[in-house]
Amino acid sequence: MSFTPDIRLFSCHYTSQQSCADQGAELRKLGFPENIRLNRVSCTGKLQVTTLLKAFEEGADAVYVVGCPVDACHNVKGSLRAAKRVEAVRQALGELGVEPERVAMYHLPRGLHPEFIDAGREMNERIGKLGPGPFRLNRQTESTLMGA
Amino acid sequence: MIIAERKPLAEIVDMVKGHDKILVLACRGCVTVCSAGGEREAAILASLIRLGLQKIGSSAEVIEGSLVRQCDKEYIDAIDRWQGQYDAILSTACGVGVNFIANLRPGDNVYPALNTTFFGGSAQQGIWSEQCAGCGDCVLHLTGGLCPVARCAKSLMNGPCGGSVDGRCEIDREVDCVWQLIYDRMGRLNRREELQTSVPIRDWSSAGHGGPRKQVRKDLTV
């Protein structure tokens, strides 16, 4: 089935800093999937499990988090905490009979690196193959790539 | 404190799936400290129930609330504030809380979100271990403060048994033999000779084997 996945990205301020320059123009130019909604947070360590779950409640097909490298987090252990919470959501999805790979954690260096684009493409491709998620009925009004 | 852990989500969703309005009721006591049933966990669980119900093609209005504790009548009475907003309570308290709601709210459906596991403590973040069995006849004065009832797999009163090897229990090499710990500790305290005394056969009636236990303090009853 061909469909456009609704994917929510939560990225730390530092990792996505340059990615957001010019309202994301550079991102689009480099081929970052336009259906991925980028939400910048001060530190991924501040993300709560409920924040990730809310995205699914809103109808997301997938959610992923991009934070600092584990050994180079600006806030020391922020991205490590985020990874633990992403894992908690993975396990919960599994318990509900939903593909755990609909949520993922990436640790990437600061700035606009090819890996940031690659992670978006990878998620887009993965979810495209998985198909629509089971929570799409609750889909809210579409927002733009830089909506958050 | 009382330690607990969330039940499997499929079990929880199956419990509540027939209800239209569900109150996920957190407890701000022990289960908050052990990160099983406090306000944060209740919010997560409410979200997961909404998702779980949607996954099986069902739905319900799921709200969250919390009580200071769920093991005192005056706090249970405070459930009145959600009157009309639920037809089932999913308690994230320990089993005591669920029982108290069932005892005091005869017309309310109440379900347990947690499995109550043991009395324990947290030696490091995210890890809890059993320390007390609540057996009603404490022997810690005989064992240097380390409990053989809760921490020996056989609850031996005159250990260690033959399964103790290099200070580890035969049930699991990761588990300390508490009798080895007791022996070592009593030695450090120059009290090892106290262990020469045979402990009499234990009367387990105080441990729940004599039926549900009750405690009355006449100086406190009015």
Image (cartoon, rainbow, N blue to C red):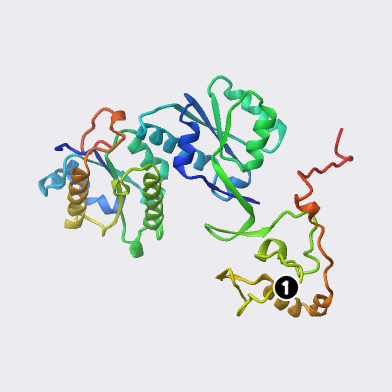
Relative to B79, is A111 on the left or the right?
Answer: left
* Horizontal and vertical percent position of residue B6: 52, 46
* Horizontal and vertical percent position of residue B108: 61, 25
Seen in the picture, residue B185 relative to A17 is either above or below; the reply is below
* Horizontal and vertical percent position of residue B73: 72, 32
Relative to B69, is B199 on the left or the right?
Answer: right
Q: Residue tagged by mark 1?
A: B159
- Quarter of the image with the C terminus of chain B is top right
- Residue at the (12%, 47%) spot, across then down: A31
Relative to A77, is B133 on the left or the right?
Answer: right
- Residue at the (27%, 39%) spot, across then down: A61
Callout 1, which amino acid? Gly
Relative to B158, is B172 on the left or the right?
Answer: left
Name the quadrant containing residue A127: top left
Name the quadrant containing residue B129: bottom right
Q: Could you tell me which chain the residue with mark 1 belongs to?
A: B
Disc 1 crowd rating (10 Å Cα; few below 14, some 14-19, many 20+) is some
Seen in the picture, residue B167 relative to A39 is either above or below; the reply is below
- Residue at the (21%, 40%) spot, across then down: A131
Seen in the picture, residue A60 relative to B137 is either above or below; the reply is above
- Residue at the (35%, 35%) spot, across then down: B55
Q: Quick one: which residue is furthest to the top in this view?
A: B84
